[in-house]
Amino acid sequence: MFCPKCGTQVADGGAFCPACGTAIVIGTAAAGIAAAAAAPPAEATATPVVVKTNEGAKDGINKCPACGSSDIALNLATGLLRCNFCRKEFSSEADTLDYDISRLQGVIIGSGSDTIVADAATMITLKCTACGAEVVIDTAESAQARCHWCRNTLSINQQIPNGAIPDALIPFRLTKEQAQKHIEAFVSKRQFFAHPRFKAEFTTQNIMGVYLPYMVIDVNAHADLRGQGEHLVRKYTVGSGDNKKTYYDADLYNLGRDFDLHIDDLTVEASNERINQVAGVNTNNVINAILPYPLKETVKFNANYLRGFTSEKRDINREQLAPLAGAQVRDIARHQAKQTALFYDRGIHWDQVQVENKGELWKSVYLPVWLYSYLEVKGNGKKLLHYVAVNGVTGETMGSVPLNTAKLFIVSAIVEAVGLVLGVGATILLLFAS
């Protein structure tokens, strides 16, 4: 049996081509086609199975399907690619790296999530297919460059081993003007305690649209939790006045939960710099606060979506992210177990949390963020980089601004003094009343 797409020989019974990942369908029944498309590769084992997500992608000139122009960019109003010459709009193919989670076995990864080669070059030379000139693209900065002779736009779409090309992305939907309004509204609510220098220098003209690298993970697991839970039997108060004490009587139970766990689109940052959450250096952990993204809207990577925006390369591998992802999976297991144990209203202590991953699917995805940044230089010479980030699809906004610590201290002191005065006044009234 041979793959209908690339011609590679496939073992009898194989569900997917080992070379290009194309589903192998036996017969033409609709049910058979649906089952094959939903099933993960039959070869999935402890060794990762790599599914080629850039099959058919070609480096060079991406032409408009109507007029052949290479002047193509994202139309933020529609989320589609638009030819700037004839105005035709079209979309990249939908992201097809998605399987029935309950049937995932072993580890499956998209080719854009494969191990990064440490010494892979960032400088890529492409031959312009229009005029024959050689054009150099620095993938650390962009996936596109213009031919200096014929002005055609050349793009890198094939995955290279330096992490610059992901499996998929979600296009921007918010315009710069919309993002500016979100950032201005966020900062205006914090103006009172903001540092005077920041207020004088604040402007949203320098915000940038950037695609940030994430790993998106599907997990088919089995969870087994054992622990103890308390159920409140009665609550009562003994004594009077200042000598009152409240007591709680609770029954203690041994309990366990054993269930299958299917996690769809767990999202983890895939940049060493972004994942570094040292609060004394930067506040980039706000990026996680603008999640989630509509991950069912991902499309196959096409360099034209990046035009007019910047992007960061993935510089961290699946093996490095696995412990963080595993910790989040265990947290999800605890949360799911708690939802089935509401009877234990005094709390649960889990002595044992075991999660067996039966299957995983990893893919590298670019997610769109509008980003405002401000470098605060403190009086002691220390520097802190502040961010305000806007989800490029939903508009969710989070960030931090430099604080006027003197004003914050004064207001805190006033609040504390008022609280003390009110407390003394209330005590005097009680004494007179008694």
Image (cartoon, grey):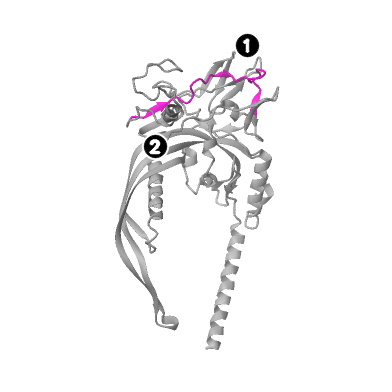
Mark 1 to mark 2 CA distance (whole Å):
43 Å
Quadrant (top left, top right, bottom left, bottom right) of the N terminus: top left
Residue 125 % position (x, y): 54, 17
168 is higher (above) or lower (below) than 423: above
Q: Is residue 53 magenta?
A: yes
Q: Secondary structure at mark 1?
A: loop
In front: 136, or 209? 209
Range of residues picked out in magenta: 47-73
| Residue at the image position 56 percent from the left and 84 percent from the top | 429
Considering the whole magenta stretch, tell me its main secondary structure. loop
Question: Which residue is more in the foreground, 16 or 409?
Answer: 16
Going 57% across and 18% down the picture, which residue do you hit? 60
Q: From the top left corner, tell me how far across and down residue 29 is, in percent.
A: 44, 25
- Residues at discs 1 and 2 in contact (Cβ within 8 Å): no
Q: Residue at x 47, y 46 (%)?
A: 278
Q: Is residue 378 magenta?
A: no
Answer whether residue 134 is visible to the viewer in this image: yes
Instruction: Give percent across and percent down for residue 251.
Output: 32, 67
Q: Quick check: 282 above or below 133?
A: below
Few, some or many residues within 10 Å of mark 2 (<14, 14–19, 20+): few
Q: Secondary structure at mark 2?
A: helix
Q: Which mark is residue 131?
A: 1
- Front in this rendered view, residue 400 or 336: 336
Work out whether mark 1 precedes mark 2 in sequence or the reverse, and give the earlier one. Answer: 1
Amino acid under disc 1: Cys
**Residue farthest right in this picture:** 86
Mark 1, Cα crowd under 10 Å, few <14 / some 14-19 / many 20+, is few
Amino acid residing under circle 2: Gln
Camera sees residue 315 = no
Point out which mark residue 320 bears: 2
* Residue lying furthest top: 132
